[in-house]
Image (spheres, rainbow, N blue to C red):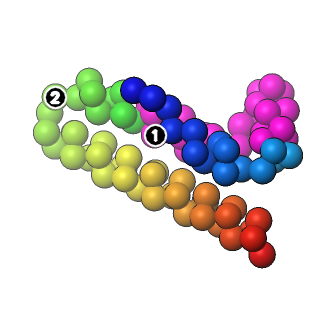
């Protein structure tokens, strides 16, 4: 499955560089942390067989994805304004 890199390329180059420096220092941005959480939840969903647990994990994924989308939208507005 191809990676969605649109958020990466929508981020200004200087901000990407700062994120890279932080990551190399063992720190990650809130956005990256959320993406990692979403990826882990998707793996958990793939392994979960009980429907009530699957529903719960799906709900958490939606919430985290919404939170990520809001963060990205705020960044876009800050860059424009």
Mark 2 touches mark 1? (CB < 8 Å): no
Spot occupied by residue 77 in the image (x, y as percentages of width and height): 69, 70
Location of the N terminus by quadrant is top left
- In the foreground, 16 or 43: 16
Q: Residue at x 45, y 58 (%)?
A: 66
Q: Is residue 33 above or below residue 47?
A: below
- Disc 2: CA contacts within 10 A as few (<14), some (14-19) or many (>=20): few
Examine the rendering and report whether any part of residue 55 can be seen: yes
Q: Which residues are magenta?
A: 16-40
Q: Nearer the viewer, residue 47 or 8?
A: 8
Pick whichever, 36 or 13, lies toward us. Answer: 13
Res. 37 in view: no
Q: Position of residue 12 (x, y in %)?
A: 78, 50
Q: Which mark is residue 19?
A: none
Q: Residues within 10 Å of mark 1 (few under 14, many from 20)?
A: many
Residue at the spot 65% in from the left edge and 42% down from the top edge: 8
User: Which badge, 2 or 1, comes first in the chain's sequence?
Assistant: 1
Residue 37 locus on image (x, y percent) = 50, 38
The label number, if any, that marks residue 49 in the structure image: 2
Alpha carbon of mark 2 to alpha carbon of mark 1: how far? 18 Å
Question: Within the magenta stretch, is there residue 34?
Answer: yes
In this rendering, the answer to whether 76 lies above or below 34 is below
| SS category of the residue bearing label 2 | loop
Q: Secondary structure at mark 1?
A: helix
Q: Which residue is mark 1?
A: 38
Please name the residue shown 77% across and 75% down the image.
81
Farthest bottom residue?
A: 81
Q: Main secondary structure of the magenta part?
A: helix
**Residue 72, magenta (yes or no):** no
| 28 left or right, relative to 60 | right
Mark in the foreground, 2 or 1: 1
């Amino acid at each position: 499955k191809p990676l969605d890199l649109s958020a990466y390329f929508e981020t200004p180059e200087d901000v990407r560089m700062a994120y890279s420096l932080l990551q190399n220092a063992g720190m990650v941005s809130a956005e990256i942390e959320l993406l990692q959480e979403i990826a882990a939840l998707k793996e958990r969903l793939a392994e979960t067989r009980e429907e009530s647990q699957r529903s719960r994990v799906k709900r958490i994924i939606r919430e985290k994805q919404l939170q990520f989308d809001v963060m990205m939208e705020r960044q876009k507005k800050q860059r424009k304004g």
